[in-house]
């Protein structure tokens, strides 16, 4: 199993009021439902960076980093008005690498895209 130090970093760019996408398969026949571990880095009460680690997927050789600015919150949501379930945060844990409280979540069934939006808060929208 690869550790966080063995993974390649993919830097995603988000500007204020712009969107960034991560595509994935929501379920694997051997590994089950896809998960993400999200490590938010806070400075002076503002979110400054997000690290997103794919979990429960085949051949994971990468992780994502997103520079954000001037956000006071992080909100994982889904399009529930289209019949999709909300993402399920099932674990909060301490990340030794980033020295922050991270969260681990399951993606909603039949979703295939994670959209990262930076408004007054940072939204992680599963579509």
Image (spheres, grey):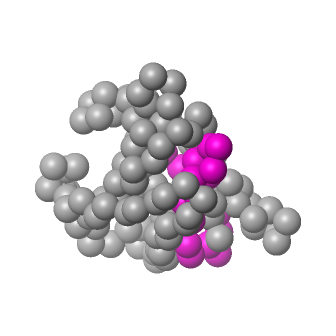
Identity of the residue drawn at 41% across and 27% down? 43
Tell me where residue 18 sits by quadrant.
bottom right
**Looking at the image, can residue 126 be seen?**
yes
Between 29 and 79, the residue placed more toward the observer is 79
Report the side of 100 relative to 109 (left or right): left
Residue 9 rendering spot, x and y as whole percentages? 24, 59
**Quadrant holding the C terminus:** bottom right
Residue 112 part of the magenta segment: yes
Span highlighted in magenta in the image = 103-124
Residue 107 rendering spot, x and y as whole percentages? 58, 61
Identity of the residue drawn at 68% across and 54% down? 77
Q: Residue furthest top?
A: 44
Number of callouts in the render? 0
Vertical placement of residue 32 versus 104, above or below: below
Report the side of 53 relative to 104 (left or right): left
**Looking at the image, can residue 50 be seen?**
no
Vertical placement of residue 22 versus 50, above or below: below
Residue 81 part of the magenta segment: no
**Quadrant holding the N terminus:** bottom left
Identity of the residue drawn at 53% across and 50% down? 105
Report the side of 19 relative to 87 (left or right): left
Residue 104 rendering spot, x and y as whole percentages? 48, 45
Residue 23 rendering spot, x and y as whole percentages? 48, 75
Between 41 and 6, the residue placed more toward the observer is 41
Tell me where residue 109 sits by quadrant.
bottom right
Report the side of 24 relative to 98 (left or right): right
Identity of the residue drawn at 48% across and 43% down? 69
């Amino acid at each position: 199993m690869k550790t966080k130090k063995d993974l390649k970093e993919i830097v995603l760019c988000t500007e204020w009021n712009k969107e960034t996408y991560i595509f994935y398969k929501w379920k694997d026949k051997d590994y089950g439902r896809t998960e993400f571990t999200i490590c938010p880095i806070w400075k002076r009460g503002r979110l400054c960076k997000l690290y997103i680690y794919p979990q429960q997927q085949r051949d994971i050789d990468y992780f994502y980093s997103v520079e954000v600015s001037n956000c006071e919150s992080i909100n994982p949501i889904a399009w529930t008005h289209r019949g999709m379930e909300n993402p399920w945060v099932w674990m909060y844990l301490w990340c030794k690498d980033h020295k922050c409280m991270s969260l681990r979540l399951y993606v909603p069934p039949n979703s295939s895209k994670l959209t990262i939006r930076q408004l007054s808060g940072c939204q992680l929208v599963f579509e």
